Amino acid sequence: MPLVLPNNIDDTLALLSQEDYVADRSLATTLFLALKMGRPLFLEGEAGVGKTEIAKVLSAALGRRLVRLQCYEGLDIASAVYEWNYSRQMIEIRLTEAAGAVDKQGLSSDVFSSDFLIERPLLQALRGEEDGPSVLLIDELDRTDEPFEAYLLEILSDFQITIPEIGTIKAKQPPIVIITSNRTREIHDALKRRCLYHWVDYPNAERELQIVNAKLPGIDSKLSQQLVAFVQRLRDQDLFKSPGVAETLDWSDALTQLDKVALDSDTIDNTLGALLKYQDDISRIRGSEAAQLLEQVKLELANV
């Protein structure tokens, strides 16, 4: 299927919406420009605000294969780009020796051919598909070391990889690149300059309510309004980790599974583990603090 990109910002919003992703116009504008200009999109923000989901949604909406590189400390070329299948190479060498006709130069060419090459995410993305580019998600880049970041910079500059035994592999069509970071450390400016940048913030109450209703269409309207207002107020508290959209959706699903149609103090206390992920935060909110926040939410909604 040939790649068909959105023609304008409104089309980009509609593209995301068809996969139940509720984006604001600022994000849609940056995404539209990244697609049109052929530039990587660098998304930064707190964990759980929907950065990774954008790549998944874009892949599904455009009908492109999603190639995901999950970053971590110590990530190297063998895990991210390519490595040789040494066990298969040794078997091939032993079989050739057993046959009694060993041409060292020819054997070297044979065992260092693409048949023995294990492609990792970055190389897979550069090769792409026959009918067009893949969507390459480089997730949580801030978890990697700076040397890998420098290597990635080289790849994103020319969209090519040099393998000494084979040569240079260049993308026929550059992949659609989405890079995410939770900002646990700063990413080098040189890499950011090659990207279009967007900070993905927590959504406001109106958009978060739209997200909940899109992902859980059967949820009671009173419950969805109350829980979104509660989460919005919770983010104003001095917590170690404020709940992201992912936690809001988990909590919404949990309350729906319990057949709740409205919030109450006991239910909040018993289900905080779906919303908060640190015991210190749960201990601080559980009980009187949660009850007070709930009263504020009810008053707020009563005056709407």
Image (spheres, rainbow, N blue to C red):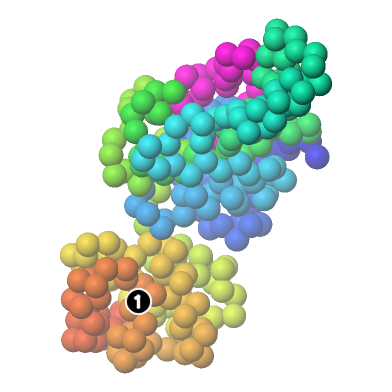
* Picture residue at 44% right of the left edge, 64% below the top: 246
Point out the image quarter for the N terminus: top right
How far across and how far down the image is residue 73, in percent? 36, 40
* Picture residue at 57% right of the left edge, 68% below the top: 214
The answer to whether residue 118 is left or right of residue 148 is: right
Query: In what element is the residue under mark 1?
Result: helix
- Figure check: 235 above or below 285: above
The answer to whether residue 1 is left or right of residue 153 is: right
- Quarter assignment of residue 141: top left
Q: Answer yes or no: is residue 157 visible.
A: yes
Residue at mark 1: 273
Q: Is residue 256 magenta?
A: no
* Picture residue at 31% right of the left edge, 43% below the top: 183
Point out the image quarter for the C terminus: bottom left
Q: Which residues are magenta?
A: 152-178
- Quarter assignment of residue 117: top right
- Figure check: 246 above or below 164: below
Q: Check disc 1 and give the amino acid type.
A: Gly
How far across and how far down the image is residue 175, in percent? 62, 31
